[in-house]
Amino acid sequence: MGLEFMDIEEMVKMISAKSLKEEAKSRGIKTHCVKKIDLAKQLPKNVLEKLVDKDN
């Protein structure tokens, strides 16, 4: 399955919390007490795709 057909929930399952939080912090998104899915919804889809490739 290509990344362009995956939804956010499927992508989040493939990304580590650490890398997701690091990316969010670098973009100025608050990460304290925030779930992975909520962080992912605030990031652009191309960033999530990059993180999926990096973590897998």
Image (tube, grey):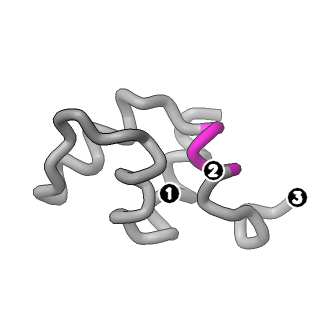
The residue that label 1 is drawn on is 48
Mark 2 residue crowding within 10 angstroms, few (<14) / some (14–19) / many (20+): some
The answer to whether 10 is drawn above or below residue 27 in the figure is above
Name the quadrant of the C terminus: top right
The residue that label 2 is drawn on is 11
The residue that label 3 is drawn on is 1
Name the quadrant of the N terminus: bottom right
Give the mark nearest the N terminus, 1 or 2: 2
Q: How far apart are marks 1 and 2 (CA)?
A: 7 Å
Q: Distance between the residues labelled 3 and 2?
A: 12 Å
Mainly helix, strand or loop, the magenta region?
A: helix
Q: What stretch is highlighted in magenta?
A: 10-14
Disc 1 and disc 2 in contact, CB within 8 angstroms: yes
Name the disc covering residue 32, or none.
none
Identify the residue at horizontal 23%, vertical 34% (top origin). 33
Identify the residue at horizontal 37%, vertical 64% (top origin). 43
